[in-house]
Image (cartoon, rainbow, N blue to C red):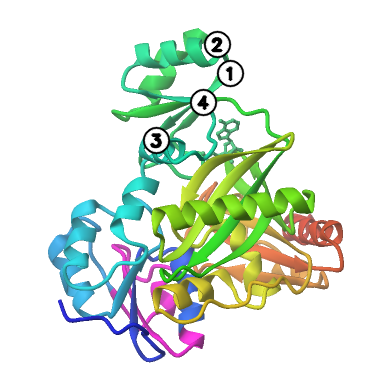
C-alpha cells in the first residue's frame, strides 16, 4: 500500500462505496472543488454515478471488484453502513478508508453501538439485546411496555422496527423481524428529536452543524428545521456530547448523532458515520455544506466554517408524491425561497427518497411554512 499524502488536494480521486443520494450530493461537492470521483454500486447509472467520473458496477460483496475500485482512487468513503466487512478490509489493504472500518463496525450494529455508548458513559434508552421471541417477551416485561423492537443490523428508515404495545405481540414481531439478533428499547416519550453533525479531521479539530430538529413520518425523516428550538444551553450540551462521541470513536470525516430530547435530558438514539438526511439544509443555508465538510475532513484539508447564514427547513420528497403522476415542479418552484434537489432516481416507489426541498427565510417558522407549502403544491389538484 503506497503512503497517502497528509493532504489530498483537488485533482485526486475520491472513491465512494454506495451510489445513492448521499454519494450524489458528495460527488457534486467534490466536482465543484475540482476532485475526480469514482462510485462503487451494483446498479448502473446509480444517482451518484450520474455525477461521477466513473462507476465500478459490482455487488458490494464482490471483493475482487472492490480491489479494482480501490486501485482507481486515492481515498475511500462510504454512504451507507452495511458495507460487508470483507469488502472494507480488502479496500483498506490498498487505500485508506475514512471514517475507519473500526468506526463503521460500531455504528452499523445497534447492540454494539448501544454497548459502546453506554460503556463510555453516553446516555441511551434502556435496552436489551434479544436473540429469540422469549428474549423479546422478557425484555418487554423488564423494560415495561410499550417497547420498540429493532433489528441489530440492516435496519434503516424504520425498516426492521416494530412498536410493541402488548406482551402477546412479541412472537409475531420477532418472526416479522426475521433477523438473528435484535434490540428491544424502552419507548422514549420524547419532546423532540434533534441531530448534530460533527466533522473531525483526525488531528483533534472538530466542527459541528446543529442541533437540527427532526420530525419523522412512518419512521422516515419528514421535515428538518435549523436551528432547533431548544435553549442555547441545551444546544451547547447536544453539540458537546456529539463531539465527545466523535472524539471517543476516533472519527475522521462526519459523524451524525441523533438524539431524543426528554425534558432537559438528552438521550442518544443513533449514530451514523457519514453525511445525513438531516444535514441537507447545509447545502443551501451554511457557509460550508456537510458534503464539502466530509470531503475536507477525509482529504486532510482545514475544516470549513459551519456558520448558518439563514434559518432553514428541509422537507423530503418520497416516491408517494408520484402516485398520481409527475409532481407539479413549477408550482413548488413558484414559492419564493424554495430550492429543489432531485436525486435522479428512475423509479418513484412509495417510501423511497426521491429528492428534497429546502426553504430559507427570516425565521424557522417561516421556512417551515414555505417548505410545506411548496411540497403541498407538488400534488395539489389544478
Ligand atoms: P431509528 O431507526 O432508531 O432512528 O428510529 C426511527 C424513529 O423511530 C426515531 O427517529 C423515532 O422517531 C422513533 N423511535 C426509535 N426508537 C424509539 C424509542 N426508543 N422511543 C420512541 N421512539 C423511538
Residue at image position (45%, 90%) is: 34
Residue at image position (16%, 67%) is: 93
Between the C-alphas of marks 3 and 2, the distance is 26 Å
Q: Which of the two discs, 4 and 1, labels the residue nearer the N terminus?
A: 4
Q: Residues within 10 Å of mark 2 (few under 14, many from 20)?
A: some
Q: Which of the two discs, 3 and 2, labels the residue nearer the N terminus?
A: 3
Q: Is residue 148 located in the magenta-colored stretch of the structure?
A: no
Q: Residues within 10 Å of mark 4 (few under 14, many from 20)?
A: some
Image coordinates of residue 193 in percent, x first then y, are: 66, 43
Describe the element under mark 1 as helix, strand or loop.
loop
Q: Which of the two discs, 2 and 1, labels the residue nearer the N terminus?
A: 1
Between the C-alphas of marks 4 and 2, the distance is 18 Å
Asked whether the beta carbons under mark 1 and mark 3 sit within 8 Å of each other, the answer is: no
Image coordinates of residue 218 in percent, x first then y, are: 60, 38
Q: Which residue in the structure is indicated by mark 1?
A: 146
Closest to the camera, between mark 4 and mark 2, is 4
Query: Residue 54: which numbered mark, if any?
Result: none
Give the number of callouts: 4
Q: Which of the two discs, 4 and 3, labels the residue nearer the N terminus?
A: 3
Q: Quadrant location of residue 326? A: bottom right
Query: Residue 115: which numbered mark, if any?
Result: 3
> Which is more toward the observer, 240 or 164?
240
Amino acid at each position: 500500500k503506497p503512503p497517502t499524502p497528509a493532504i489530498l488536494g483537488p485533482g485526486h480521486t475520491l472513491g465512494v462505496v454506495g451510489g445513492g443520494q448521499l454519494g450524489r450530493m458528495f460527488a457534486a461537492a467534490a466536482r465543484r472543488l475540482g476532485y475526480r470521483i469514482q462510485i462503487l454500486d451494483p446498479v448502473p447509472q446509480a444517482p451518484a454515478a450520474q455525477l461521477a467520473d466513473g462507476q465500478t458496477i459490482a455487488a458490494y460483496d464482490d471483493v475482487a471488484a472492490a480491489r479494482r475500485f480501490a486501485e482507481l482512487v486515492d481515498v475511500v468513503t462510504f454512504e451507507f453502513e452495511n458495507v460487508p466487512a470483507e469488502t472494507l478490509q480488502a479496500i483498506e489493504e490498498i487505500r485508506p478508508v475514512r471514517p475507519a472500518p473500526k468506526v463503521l463496525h460500531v455504528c452499523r450494529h445497534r447492540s454494539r453501538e448501544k454497548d459502546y455508548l453506554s460503556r463510555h458513559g453516553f446516555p441511551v434508552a434502556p435496552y436489551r439485546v434479544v436473540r429469540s421471541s422469549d428474549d423479546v417477551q422478557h425484555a418487554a416485561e423488564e423494560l415495561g411496555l410499550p417497547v420498540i423492537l429493532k433489528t441489530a443490523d440492516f435496519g434503516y428508515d424504520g425498516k426492521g422496527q416494530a412498536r410493541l404495545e402488548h406482551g402477546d405481540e412479541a412472537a409475531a414481531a420477532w418472526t416479522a423481524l426475521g433477523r438473528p439478533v435484535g434490540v428491544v428499547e424502552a419507548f422514549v416519550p420524547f419532546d423532540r428529536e434533534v441531530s448534530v453533525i460533527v466533522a473531525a479531521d483526525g488531528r483533534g479539530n472538530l466542527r459541528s452543524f446543529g442541533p437540527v430538529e427532526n420530525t419523522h413520518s412512518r419512521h422516515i425523516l419528514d421535515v428538518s428545521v435549523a436551528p432547533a428550538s431548544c435553549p442555547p444551553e441545551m444546544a451547547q450540551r447536544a453539540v458537546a456530547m456529539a463531539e465527545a462521541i466523535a472524539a471517543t470513536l476516533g472519527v475522521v470525516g462526519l459523524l451524525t448523532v441523533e438524539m431524543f430530547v426528554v425534558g432537559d435530558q438528552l438521550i442518544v438514539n443513533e449514530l451514523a458515520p457519514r453525511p445525513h438526511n438531516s444535514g441537507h439544509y447545509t447545502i443551501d443555508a451554511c457557509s460550508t455544506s456537510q458534503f464539502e465538510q466530509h470531503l475536507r475532513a477525509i482529504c486532510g484539508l482545514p475544516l470549513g466554517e459551519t456558520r448558518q447564514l439563514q434559518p432553514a427547513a428541509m422537507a423530503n420528497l418520497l416516491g408517494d408524491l408520484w402516485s398520481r403522476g409527475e409532481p407539479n415542479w413549477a408550482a413548488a418552484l413558484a414559492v419564493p425561497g424554495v430550492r429543489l434537489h432531485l436525486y435522479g432516481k428512475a423509479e418513484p416507489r412509495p417510501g423511497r427518497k426521491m429528492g428534497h426541498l429546502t426553504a430559507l427565510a427570516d425565521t424557522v417558522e417561516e421556512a417551515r411554512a414555505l417548505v410545506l407549502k411548496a411540497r403541498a403544491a407538488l400534488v395539489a389538484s389544478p
